[in-house]
Image (cartoon, rainbow, N blue to C red):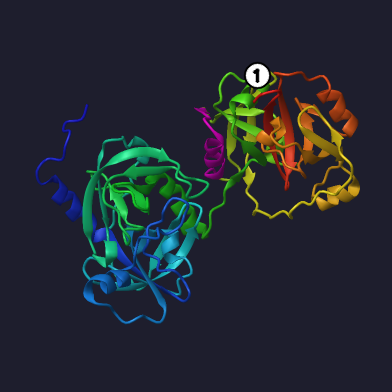
Amino acid sequence: MRDTVAPAAGTLARVAEAVKPAVVNIKTQARGMTPGGHARAPGGRPPSEEFSPEDFMRRFFGGVPEPGPQRGLGSGVIIDGSGIALTNAHLVENATRIEVVTLEGDTYPAKVLGADTATDLAVLQLEGVKGPLPTVLLADSDTVRVGDWVLAVGSPFGLQSTVTIGIVSGKARHIGAGPFDDFLQTDAAINPGNSGGPLVNMGGQVVGINTAIVAGGSGIGFAIPSNMVKRIGQELREKGRVRRGWLGVSIQPLTPELAKSFGVKSEAGALIAKVQPDSPAGQAGLAAGDVVIELDGKPVKDPGDVQRGIGLAKPGTRTQLKAWRDGAERSVSVTLGEAPSASRRAEERPSPTPPTASGLGLGVRPLTPDLARELQTESQDGVVVAQVAPRSAAARAGIRPGDIVREVNRRPVKTVEDFERTTQRLKEGDVVSLRLERRGASRYVAITLGAA
């Protein structure tokens, strides 16, 4: 149990006075950009009801002349006396000019050493620094507890060195802002202009970098945890970009129907829908249909746990997985590769060849070489969904014409005959799992025959 349950008298002032000299106001200028001082809303978009400092002046003080270039205001925090500062990537994105203003009023031009939009973190180098600048330390965010007191320091609406107080309201929040969501939630007031500023504990150490607010939500703000900041920030500082681990699988959540069809007792885990050829996962023996239940000793609740765990690891990292296959657990050791850039797939257009019907409520046809090319798939093994009966089990499962069926109940399907042979044995009440491919991405769906 801690010595105090609330800040003692004077404690907040001492913490604020220790932190404020390291917190800076960041001014950006760019052409054709949205003002960058907005804190992100979940999903990565600036909230529509927020407004920039210029809007603030226009609304309450009769207006100001429209500037030529677009300008933005935000915050940052210095972590190295030579002038290394952290801020949000969305604040400096597309900026042609960046100025950093300290608490003492000194102004420095700055350049971006690296920015990572996936985590909304950027590292700046202040230029022309002649002496060591005030700094703050990054805390261990894993030790932060819900209910801990925190201060948010920044420049909301350009009001430099504003300090607000709150608590840590939640941890590991996933708000749809990006693939590696793992935010701290706080009720400390975070407003436009706070973006990039620190969230600090009662020891004056940074536990997070403020980045997002809920539009219309009072007392709901989010910060990038300091442990993620350490990992991403170091790589941005040293290399200018983030190299991410790569497993080489497509994964999806386990629904109750899928869990039943795969013989898994719990819905916790991540179902592997596809393993890319010659990928680290393939070389380690993982296969489509495996359910990942543990990653480096930590239980996997959903696909996000795998995505974050792999994506935040460095290429070359040796990772230990536990997977469920055919009613048994197996341990797999994988050396991660480096994540390639994403490629877009063309839209598929099924051809009008006559389908073969099935009791699942869908009709299939052979996957011909012409269809394989049209659907942008490398393998001709499988059948193509040509029709889906309205209100059928297949329709309720989201199956569409143009989907490629690769497996039925874990049995490979290479031809229409394979498909018919497997589906003819099914009866009402059976749970059927299908492995489908759509636009190059594989996933499993489960269908209960005869379910209303």
Query: In which quadrant is the C terminus drawn?
Result: top right
Q: Residue at x 87, y 24 (%)?
A: 421
Specify the quadrant of the image occupied by residue 140. top left
Q: Residue at x 64, y 21 (%)?
A: 260
In-image side of 384 versus 390 (left or right): right
Left or right: 328, with 369 as reference point: left
In which quadrant of the rendered view does residue 359 lie?
Answer: top right
* Magenta segment includes 300: yes
Q: Can you give x and y, in whole percent of width and height, for residue 217 in the image?
A: 33, 49
Task: Residue 318: say if magenta.
Answer: no
Amino acid type indicated by mark 1:
Gly
Expressed as whole percent of the image width and height from the top left, the position of residue 177 reads 47, 50
Vertical placement of 422 versus 57: above or below? above
What residue does disc 1 label?
263
Part of the protein shown in magenta? 298-313
Say how many tags the image has: 1
Q: Residue at x 42, y 79 (%)?
A: 69
Residue 353's spot in the image, x, y percent? 89, 45
Q: Is residue 429 visible?
A: yes
Secondary element under disc 1, as helix, strand or loop, is loop
Which of the two residues, 136 or 400, is positioned nearer the viewer here? Answer: 400
